[in-house]
Structure formats: structure tokens, C-alpha cells
Image (tube, coloured by chain):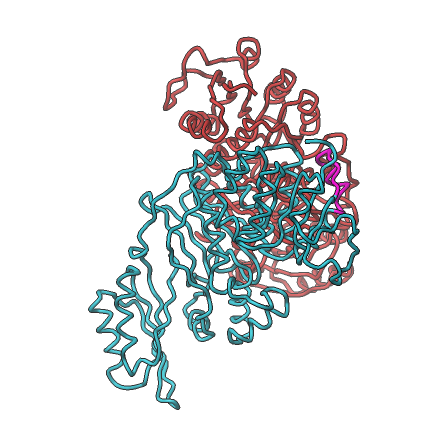
Chain colours: A cyan, B red
Amino acid sequence: MKNLVNIAIIGLGQIGIYLYNELRSKKKEIERKTGKKINIAAISARNRNKKRRFQIQKNIFFKKPIQIFRDKKIDVLFECIGQSDGISKKIVETALKNKIHVITPNKALIAKHGDRLAKLAEKNNVNLEFEASVAGGIPILRTIKEGLATNKIDKVYGILNGTTNYILSEMENSNENFNKVLQKAQQLGYAEPGNPKLDLNGFDAFAKVRILSALSFNTKISKHKCIMQGIENIDLKDIKIAGQLGLRVKLLGISQIINNRLFETVHPCLVSKNTYIGNVNGVMNAVIIEGKPIGESVLQGEGAGPGPTSSSLLSDLLSILRGNIKYPFGLSSKKRKSLKSFNNDNYTNSLYLRFEVNDKQGVLSLITNRLAKYKISVKRIIQTPDKKNKKATIVIITHKTSEKNASNCLTIFRKNKNILRAPTLIRLYN
Amino acid sequence: MKNLVNIAIIGLGQIGIYLYNELRSKKKEIERKTGKKINIAAISARNRNKKRRFQIQKNIFFKKPIQIFRDKKIDVLFECIGQSDGISKKIVETALKNKIHVITPNKALIAKHGDRLAKLAEKNNVNLEFEASVAGGIPILRTIKEGLATNKIDKVYGILNGTTNYILSEMENSNENFNKVLQKAQQLGYAEPGNPKLDLNGFDAFAKVRILSALSFNTKISKHKCIMQGIENIDLKDIKIAGQLGLRVKLLGISQIINNRLFETVHPCLVSKNTYIGNVNGVMNAVIIEGKPIGESVLQGEGAGPGPTSSSLLSDLLSILRGNIKYPFGLSSKKRKSLKSFNNDNYTNSLYLRFEVNDKQGVLSLITNRLAKYKISVKRIIQTPDKKNKKATIVIITHKTSEKNASNCLTIFRKNKNILRAPTLIRLYN
């Protein structure tokens, strides 16, 4: 790589702007560490005249990013738009085809098109780096690809979404309901002001799970249909009851190999307050890797926000400037295999079930009989009457049962007039 | 680097043997990930005929390691003897001079001679890698050098010695005294059977602190005289009293920049049971990095043992096989500066002081008067009488005071006949 490196930044949202300023303020340090001078040669954003805290020189601003490839000689391109397809995909593809290294925090793009893009990067002998796509500033991908390179990893899981973790923690701390805390999260910039759906429904965490799986197990990115649930149905009531039981609700992303098959999921879990994962609160992310011979490794840090994201983007840049051409997924695309998927029906957990019922005789026994019929044995029952409204809340903690069995059993309750709404189900993490 | 890579392993203790077996069983995986074939071309240990679970071929065994350099063409050498000087130093120097890459888990060697050895490696354009020297399997050095490369780190600290952490945890769990638990640790292989002194007195953790400082702050390895204390004087009594106060004793290694000066230390700390660090138990290690823009990052994992150590040794090997020539400390020796040291006298903490006294009138007021004279204000006093023996234990938690002031104040107590032994001092971590 030549000594003066031309950089393009595509997208000037929160992350793009932070990155731009970091690159400018750390020019000298980057040169000291890599021997390369960097030059921001092109920037693209939808609106040049939008109010920003800094001026963009006219001659490096491009309204249409594609034009950059014609007008400028770029060595490294940062894609900071964030779409899973569309312009993000087009820019990354064009860059790789033009032998330009690409760095992106775009988990949606990598989770969907990572395999194809990696192949393209390998073919053109350039890097495609995406450290910032998973767990913000935590260098988890580099750790798996390099630090733990020869370990046999069986499982990787953790808290992969800061927004939902903040909401769950804050509901517990402030005793406020989901909608109120969501508003607070939006005010603090922890949740998208417009459409926080992709955080809340587990989609964001799930994209990260897909990327973690591919790196941990040396596989292609899977396309399996998986159990993906968010936190939209977690009630303050559930958090309180869990608390009384010494448990805490956490949205976990889990990827593991069960009987040589790949199982990936995202769903809320009840975890003990005494566990490590039960004490990762607020916007923090944590990833736990179980492997041999390493044992259990934990990485925790700020999972989102422009600062931590920039930290990872720059670590990718330094890796490239040091002249390492690396396989995007740690080994060549040809050598990454596909894994069959574990049947979701056989996923087995203890369950927390919360029923809202009319406080009438026979309702509890109706529930327990149904459970017995499906051989779901009960570990614990907590019934809390709401005398005034002649209603009651029944919480049941079951012994382990399969997804299929649980879902068959629970469907029945939807049809009963004394059971006021579909029961809330939260899996216990074991 | 050529396609067939010749490897030498010097030292066949627990780690050397584990490494040897890992290299043999992972040959194919290493080839798949790096495109290089490896060949164990030479092994050296004091005794070839020692009982081992595997046979060593005669033609690769060398009683005198130095002979390897004459007889074999080696590309990568693992130094697994572990001395800070002597043969370990000689082998590493000779290898580097012969343009052989060196990988070592030897923290004593690196902490003492790392600067000079790094220069030698740079001069000869080979790698000197020592990921396994700090925190076993946790890829902490690579994370600082690469994953967090452009962060400004202010502080790095943590639990860096598994042996002492196991002993402290086990004293709390089993209610047994130091010596008993030390024996148990030795039986389990967590502490050196012969001479566990370097673990217990903080020396081992301190070598790791020195290495972490150099990497985190881009400095030469410091030679400052520092506060280094181990856990030999921690009594079961202290652990119990701490427990009642919601605290736990942990041996922490700390390195930080205070007013542009470097402060490094290892000593037992009292930490809250509610903190992250207070819940890292058993043989686990944890390193916490505070930096900008990353915020607080935590890495936790098994800090010792041949498995985790091998994991790091192999990650170093893969990095070399992938053809990266890297500065051992992340940037060129010429650019690493020296930092002045923070004056230990000004190190300031709240203190836990335990006095064993004769249960006589006036003793408590003697102590509190002395403290008052040195302007050390008291936050809390717990006096527990031992009626039978006419003795008492007085525990005092103070507000913050400097090292110098505390040590001046405490010296006086040594001369009093009613104070039965020098008071135990444990700093509260804040």
C-alpha cells in the first residue's frame, strides 16, 4: 500500500460524523502507528448543507456516492449508511470490484450479503472489515478470528443490543412501564427516535448472531428460520415477579452447536441475578464464548454509540494500513462450510408462564390440568389475586419442555373465556 | 514466509507439552486457516527420558537448546522455560538474531527485558509475540494493540493472577484459613507445588501490570519502584469481616495515568460485592480497560493453565503464519516514550485497618487519637471482643488518606504493648 492513503466516508449520520472527526484528530497517531498518512478524499451524504458542527470542503463532497469511484482514487472506503440492500450494497460491491478496501459497521448488510461480499473481496485481494457491526467497541470479531483462532468454539451468546438492555434495566430501576422507558431511551439517544422496531423486535441482535456464528464455527452465514423474539411483550409486571424470584429479564442472542447442528436464536431470557450475564446492565453489551481449550471467555463493553463504533472502525483501518490482507471471515470462502440447522421444535427450556385470569374457581386447575396433559411438570406456582377487579395473575415456572410441546399446549388457552389473554412466555436461561 | 514452517519448542513443562500436542492435533486446521504447513523440527527439555504420555523422536530432541540453532533451520521458536534471565533470555536473543520468530508466555522475561528484545526483533524484521504472558487465554494484548488501537487509554486494571484469586475465593467459600486453602490450590494444580511465592507476593501480577502499561500507554516498560503487596497477610478473619460489610478481598493489578505520570501497583483491595470485579471468582482473570472513545471494556476468562495458555500461543503462531510482521509493542521502539512515575506517597485510598489488641480501657481511644492526630478521619468502627482471652479485634474503615500519611501514622502502633501486632491494612478500591 502506498504511503498516502485516500479515504472516503459514505454517509454522515451520527457515526459518519464522529468517524470524520476522529480521523482528522488522529491523523498523527495513525501515522505514528502505521507509517501511513491518511487523507479524507471524499465524503458523501444526502444533504451537503445540513447543519453540522464542521464545514465540508466543496471539492471532497459528493451528493451521489457512485460518482466518487469515477472522480477520485480511493484506497479505503467507509460505508456508514446502514441499509441491508440498496445503496449500501451497491457502494460496497462497487468499491470491492474497484479494489478498494471496505470498512463498515453495517450488520444488516453483512448478515444478509456477507458471504457474497467476502468472496468479492477475496477475488479482488482487498479487505472487507466489519468489526463495528457486532457489539460496538468490543473487538469481538477480531478476538474470534485471531485471538482465539485455533479454539473449538461450541457456543457464543450474550447481550447484543444496548437499546433493549437499557430498557429492561431501566424498567427495573425506575419501576416504569415499557412505553415510558422507551421514550426515555429515545430522548437519551439510546433508541432510534423514528423507528426503534429493529432493536425492539430482536432483528438487530439477530443479525449479530448470524455474524458471530459464521466466525465462531467457520461456516457460511446461515439462512435458517429461527426463533426470534423481542422485548415488546415484556411487562413491568414480569420484571417485578422475576425480581422476586431472584431473576432478571435479558434479551439474549444465542448461537451454538447442538449435535453437530447449528442453533441460533434471539429471545428474552430469565437469568439469575447472581450470574455474570444477569449483571450486565444499561447500554452495555457482553459476549460470552465457550470453547476449547480456552474455557469461558467474556468480553464486555459499550455496545453502541458513535464513540465505541468509531473505535472499532479505526481498528479496522489500522489493520488495513498495516498491510494485512485478511479473509473477511478468518478463512477463505471456499473453506467455509454450511451447517445443517437444529430443529427449533426440539429447543428445550424451563418456562415462565404468566396467565391473566378471572378469579374464578377452577381456573387454576384448568391450567394445571392442561399442563399435565402435555407432561409439562410444574416447579413453582405464584398466584396473586386482584380482588377489586375479580382477577388474578398466575405465574407458573415449569420444568424443561420442548418448544413444540409448549406451543401446542399454550394454543389451547387462547380459546378460554376465563383466561383473559394469551399467556406471556419467557424462557429460563440454563 | 515459505510454505513449510519449522517450529522449535524449548521447555517441556506443563505448557510445552500441551502446546506440543495442540500443534500436532491442529496441523490441518492451521493449514486451512493460514495456508502453511507446520513441522515440529526441534524440541528441547532437560530430560529426554522423563515419563511423558508421548514419545519424542530422537532426531528432533535436543538436550542443549543452543545446539538447535546450529543443527536445524527453524522459522518459529516457542520459549516455554519461563526464567526472567539465564537460558530463557539467551535462547530468545539468539533466535531473534538468527531471524527466527519468537513466541513466549514468559511474563518475567518480557517485563524485565521486553524493550531490548523488541528492538532486537525489529532490527531483524521478525516477530516477538507474548500474548500468553498476560491473562492466559484472554487475548488482551492483541485487543489493546489492535482492537483498541486508536483509543486513548487512561487506566487498565484487573485480576491478573488466578492462583491468588482462587485462594481468596476459596477462603471465603470454605471458611478455611490461608495455609489450608493454599495446600488445596497446590493439589489442584492452581499453585506451584514447590514455590508459589511469586504468585502469592504479587510479583507475577506485577510483571503483567508492567506489560499492560507499556502496551496501553505506548511507553517503554517502566522500572519504577512501586507498591507491590501480595495476599500472604490476608487472614480468614479479614475476609469474613469484609463479607459483613458487603466487601470482598481481591488482589488487583492497577496501571493508570495520573497527572501525566504513570502509576503502577499490585495490592489486595476491598471491592464491593455488587461490582463486576467483585464477582470474578476462582481462577478467573479479568482485565478492565478505561479509554476514549471506547468507555469501559472488560475481558474475562481463564487466566492460567496449559489450555488457555496454548490458545494464546497458537493465536500468536497464526498471526505470524499469516505473514504479518508487527512491532512487538504495537509501535516501533523508537516511538515508545518513557513516562515519569507518580509519587507513591501521594496514592490515596480509604483504608481498612484491623487491630488486634488487649481488651483494656483506653486502647480504642489511643487508636482513634493517633488517627485524629494524622487527620485520618474514621468512617466506621467495628469492635469485636474476645472475652475469653481478654482481647479484642478493632476494625476501622477510614476516609481517604495518602500512603505516606497512613504509613507514618501506623508505624507508631508497632511500639504499643496493648496492640498485639502490626495492624493489617487493606485499601478500599474506589
Which residues lie in the magenta part? A24-39
- Give the quadrant of the N terminus of chain B: top right
Horizontal relation, residue A389 to residue B126: left or right? left
**Residue found at x 30% / y 75%:** A414
Residue A12 counted in the magenta span: no
Q: Is residue B421 above or below residue B131?
A: below
Q: With B208 as the anchor, is A274 left or right in this view?
A: left
Q: Which residue lies furthest to the left in this view?
A: A373
Q: In this picture, is B228 found above or below B96?
A: below
Would residue B163 be seen by someone viewing this image from the given angle?
Answer: no
The main secondary structure of the magenta stretch is: helix
Is residue A25 a member of the stretch shown in magenta?
yes
Q: Nearer the viewer, residue B134 or A165?
A: A165
In this view, the residue farthest toward the top is B71
Query: Residue B6 at x, y = what percent?
Result: 51, 18
**Which one is nearer the viewer's eye here, A311 or B276?**
A311
Query: x and y percent of residue A233 in the render?
Result: 44, 71
Residue reaching furthest bottom? A388
Give the x, y percent position of residue B430: 66, 57
